[in-house]
Amino acid sequence: MTIEKAAAIGGGVIGAGWVARLLLNGIDVSIFDPDPEASRKVGEVMKGARRAYKQMLPGGLPKEGKLTFAKTIAEAVTDADFIQESVPERLDLKHKVLAEIDLHAPANSIIGSSTSGIKPSDMQVAMKKHPERLVVGHPFNPVYLLPLVEIVGGAQTFPEAIEVAKEIYSSIGMKPVVIRKEIEAFVGDRLLEAAWREALWLIKDGICTVEELDDIMRYSFGLRWAQMGMFQVYRIAGGEAGMRHFMAQFGPCLKWPWTKLMDVPEFNDELVDLIAGQSDEQSSKWSIRELEKIRDDNLVAIMEALSKQNKGKGWGAGALHKDYTKRLATLAASTTSKAAAKSKATKPVKKIVKKPAGKRG
Ligand SMILES: NC(=O)c1ccc[n+]([C@@H]2O[C@H](COP(=O)([O-])OP(=O)(O)OC[C@H]3O[C@@H](n4cnc5c(N)ncnc54)[C@H](O)[C@@H]3O)[C@@H](O)[C@H]2O)c1
């Protein structure tokens, strides 16, 4: 299944990342963002994304989709079969924007929300026409490179919508994981916030600096986590007896005072100044755009390295990267030849809209 026409509502850090992934997959995108600087900001992200994709595809990129800036949400979504909402994380704003998208989007479109932690059930109450086609599609920054998307359905979401969303996100090179039960912050951000809270304590208490903490991550378990997750890594850490031995050894530590996680440090000016000041010391020699380039180059290099593992079949994100770049290279070859321009596999997005009561199969 491919997307014929996409809409992006919100073009900040995340929205622009979605736009970049979609355009680089040859998909036309219509975007609405009231920020007068939106076009410049999206342009900057596109520049970075093109640069990264050129490293992944030395033979050339597919023909880019066309980007149109709409004046209203209605104009952006009116003929889109896939809409991704990426406006700031406020429930009142999500309600307002999703209600408007719902009003104007074609009935059989899929609507994904980038929210980091709001439950879809809490958002879809604002959608009066077709709340059943809303899913959370929670990505990770930079959206054009990191493949994971957490898909979460709400109380009103149809199972078919989740299936179609899985196909849609997969069609643009992503790895969808459907979250089995709806909770705030899903899985990724639950883990990240737990680690962040502990990190804030460690710095507030003067145990380490921002830079030292980052070094402790990136020279150790950060390297492990790019290729195996927590549980596969811990299985190995248990030695030949595997996970059971690991649990026997480290399970009791959970009762020791190894963590302050249940408390949240007071988020006051003093803490913000401490963290921001140390972050400046660590990184102010680079601009944010320079840091983005360094990050992107490293991510591409890691995914390329992983794509060669496992006897050339690729491992984890590397296996997906291998398939994705192969698919984009084929698309590039076909979109450079006019004759093949129409050969995009096109199965229209399936209808998932509400049926009269009692008629659902
Ligand atoms: N930043 C991250 O790392 C990250 C990661 C995953 C998910 N998210 C989620 O993505 C969403 C967007 O976050 P972000 O970091 O891109 O924020 P951002 O502040 O960078 O961008 C938000 C954009 O939305 C625009 N906007 C505001 N009101 C709007 C409206 N009524 N209609 C359309 N656009 C509007 C703003 O002008 C801005 O460009 C949030 O829900 C956030 O939780 C963020």
Image (cartoon, rainbow, N blue to C red):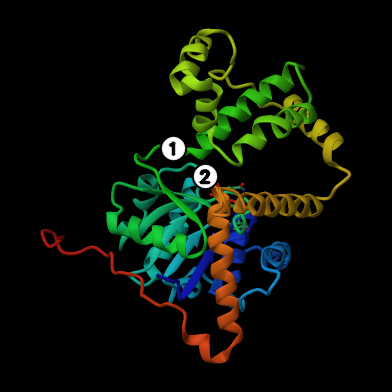
Instruction: Identify the amino acid type marked 1.
Output: Glu
Query: Which mark sits nearer the N-terminus, 1 or 2?
Result: 2
Residue nearest the viewer, comparing 214 with 96: 214
Residue appearing at x 52%, y 14% in the figure? 250
Residue extending farthest right: 285
Residue 229 placement (x, y as % from top left):
53, 36
Q: Which residue is mark 1?
A: 184
Check the picture and name the quadrant holding the N terminus: bottom left
Q: Nearer the viewer, residue 77 or 66?
A: 66
User: Is 193 placed left or right of 170 in the picture?
Assistant: right
**Residue 294, position in %: x, y?**
78, 51
Q: Position of residue 22 (x, y in %)?
A: 55, 67
Q: Nearer the viewer, residue 112 or 50?
A: 50
Within 8 Å of ligand 1, the CB of disc 2?
yes
Q: Residue furthest left?
A: 358
Determine the secondary structure under disc 2.
loop
Whether residue 360 appears in this view of the structure is yes
Residue at left offset 46%, top offset 60%: 170
Q: Which three-letter amino acid code belongs to the residue tagged 2?
A: Ser
Quadrant location of residue 112? bottom left
* Tag of residue 116: 2
Q: Secondary structure at mark 1?
A: loop
Q: Residue at x 49, y 75 (%)?
A: 75
Answer above or below: position of 342 versus 16.
Answer: below
